[in-house]
Amino acid sequence: MTPVAPVQLLPESRRGLLLGVRGWSVVIGVLAVIAGVIPVLNLVVPVGNPLHFGDYGLALVAKIMCYAMCALAMDLIWGYTGILSLGHGLYFALGGYAMGMYLMRQIGHDGNYRSDLPDFMVFLDWKSLPWTWTGSASFVFQMILVVAVPGIVAGVFGWFAFRSRIKGVYFSIITQALTFAGMLLFFRNETGFGGNNGFTDFKRILGISVAAPSTRMVLFVLTGCTLVAFYLLARVIVNSKYGRVLQAIRDAESRVMFTGYDPLKYKLSIWVLSAVMCGIAGALYVPQVGIINPSEMSPAASIEMAIWAAVGGRGTLVGPIVGAFFVNGAKSWFTQAFPEFWLYFLGALFIAVTLFLPRGIMGIKDRLKREKGVEVKA
Amino acid sequence: MRRLTLRSAFIALVAVFGTVAAPAWALDAAQARAIAVGDGDARIAALQDAVTRADPGLATFAQALLDDSVKTTATGVFIVHDDKAVDAVTGQPAKLPDDAEDVSNNNRMRGALQTALSGLRLVSPELATRRAAVDDLTKDAADPALLPVIDKAIAKETDAGLKSRLERLKAAVQIAAPDRAQRLQAIQLLSSSGEPTVRALLQARLAPDAETDPELRAAVAHAITQVEGRLAWGERLGVLFTGISLGSILLLVALGLAITYGLMGVINMAHGELMMIGAYTTWGVQSLFRHFAPGLFDAYILLAIPASFLVSAGVGAILERGVIRFLYGRPLETLLATWGISLVLMQGVRSLFGAQNVEVENPSWMSGGIAVTSNLVLPYNRLAIIAFAALVLLATWLLISRTRLGLFVRGVTQNRRMASCTGINTTRIDTLAFALGAGIAGMAGCALSQVGNVGPDLGQSYIVDSFMVVVLGGVGQLAGTVLAALGLGLMNKMLEGIAGAVLAKIFVLIFIVVFIQKRPQGLFALKGRSAES
């Protein structure tokens, strides 16, 4: 594995502050936009005013922010630890399903069949909830599941895989098989999670209407803050000694081992953390998009996560977020304007980024900066 | 589709039969009128009466009734085809009177006509027709009204095998007879059968209101165990066969993948799309044959195999030269780049040929199959694919182990630098080996086009499975790939019988993850210095 970004040591003076002055001002600026400017433009500025921020845009940005969390999670394991997962869609979907179960129970009696059970269970002629739905009426319990289920699945799988030192391409395609197996499992009606239709038609969250503008805005702000929090968390990790070991594992795992570190602990912990991040992203995604179904677990969906991180720039923390916005922005534009060209574009992006831009968009930025620096010196 | 062809073949047969039988046209006028005109019960009674006497000419007449091409007047009955009328009684051309009326048949009458036709075919002079008729009648519960015809057929039947089947057919009717002795005899006769329908029939007799005599109930239960014992073998062999069939497909799919992975450490995510290209090439060749040489249509496959190999190999070589070459040493990036290629190829095919599946017709010799037992039929197309997979495997093995190119490929696989030092042009070997792997994928696509749908998504459905074969089999050894492919195929099908298709697949995937724990490098790991880079 060639190093994607050199390990950078921050100057001693900046370490306690995490980011530089510019970094912090950008973070605060982003938070202000998410929690202040956009809500005002969406809720206060009337529809029709050129400054009005439409609901469509709001939903799109919210969705992409969830994707950006996944991209960040991918970056932690791939960009910084050198493990390429082609199955993180599984964790995203598991988090989403845990949230979806709660939302399904919140529909209560208002489903098409006016039954206590979710509609799809009435349709299957089930008389009671399966055991997997035991705590689904409790918001707190389901929120624990959002973190616990992806965490445990990733922990068990990762422990087995890393313990036997499965690496590289082998590991990647096994993660792909895992998410594929999950997709097949959730496609079955008997599994008890709505089969291929999944969950949809949500009505309420915590007793409040999901579709109400204020609810949407609260979810939007929550998503934005979570994304910023994840970014800061990732920054802490990367700057810590723990983060350095991760990068060392990426660059020369055997040497790390010979130096006396146990890569298993490091790899497993970052693996579980990234899965949990995806799970939380999924849980935020479901109430805002209004649907969760097994296609989120398809291998293609998981590979797309890798390309978000790659386009933005692996081994940088801003990169994956930029990449997620770039790719998904392009996707929503293409699928409206030229639906038949979207896959060409996406395919070309995969090829072009791997061939010409190993460090993604952030790499371009650095290169421009360097060229400028040379000019100044000359 | 199959029903339709069967039906049209049957109609053609009846027509032939009808003309042959024309001289001995012995349906009399009163009978024909009785069958064609009147109220339902009387018509059916007349029809059944005619069937018991197996009057020649009745088949043509009954078929004509089914086709709604019979017209009647006050005195005559006519069969009308393409505006030409024939007298139903004499078989001679006749002029259709102006006052002729259509005969309409309700569903009950139609059912009776169908049964009568099957019954008539039981006494046909052709052995094949008789056999087909028995097959048809065995499929669903036979009509008691046919009993006289079956008796007549048994008396006339000369073929021993068919005769015993006819007797069982008779028993299947008689099992519900009011007479106890007849029922007992029927049960005993049926216990010698090995057909799934007989089992279902016997099981139905065990329903509380079907068979009331306790002694006979015991006899039925005993007969069921005997029949099931015979069926079990067919089922077991069936699982084995479908398992091997799936395994041979997986082998074809994974063989090319294993070569490129072993040689270059590159997992080619576009492998499935190279298969798709092979399948579309087959479709193209087939369409050309249909258009320009319909007479040689059955032989198109002989040209389609090399064509699909060459086209896919060509695309593979371009990909290797254009993209993959620049990514050596970065296997994870290759994974993503080849995924991008697969997206482009898929969308490209969609743009060129449409998103719908294209229809690839089997050569006629591939339809049908060998019936080993009543519940085990080995379809020719599956057999052909197994044989084809074996041939491809043999050819690949010869190529790798006996030719100079193979020697180079093995050398580069084992130690790229050393091979380069001895003067092997490793970049050329890479291109050739990648093209070879792609070409084998193309042939796999050609084979798949004979058993499944051909569409832009063809490759996607096999890709995960074929990766699993490579993971399980390890790299650098054909034997590992073969064992893994057959093992996975068999395991999949066996578990499918127990747990259903989806759970079977999940179990297999979990098994692989666990198996990798024990042998991280697959079944056959390369040993020594080349094992870990």
Image: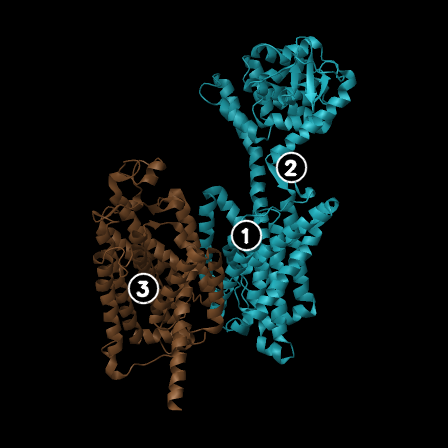
Chain colours: A brown, B cyan
- Chain ID for label 2? B
Query: Do labels 1 and 3 touch, CB within 8 Å?
Result: no
Which residue shows up at 65% across the image and 39% down it? B368
* Residue sitting at the far right: B23
Residue under the point 47% across and 66% down: A350
Numbered circle sitting on residue B458:
1
| Vertical order, B198 against B244 (above or below) | above
Q: Residue furthest bottom?
A: A378
Q: Which residue is mark 3?
A: A273
- Lower position in the chain sequence, tag 2 or tag 1: 2
Q: CA distance from mark 2 to mark 3?
A: 57 Å
For label 2, the residue is B371
Q: CA distance from mark 1 to mark 3?
A: 36 Å
- Can residue B119 be seen at all in this image of the molecule? no
x and y, in percent, of residue B184 in the image: 56, 18
Instruction: Say above or below: B126 vs A286.
Output: above
Give the SS element for disc 2: strand
Quadrant in the picture for the N terminus of chain B = top right
- What chain letter is assigned to the residue under label 3? A
Marks 1 & 3 on one chain: no
Which amino acid, mark 2?
Ala
Q: Residue at x 53, y 50 (%)?
A: B355
Q: On the rendered structure, is B31 left or right of A115? A: right
Dot 1: few (<14), some (14–19), or many (≥20) neighbours within 10 Å?
Answer: many
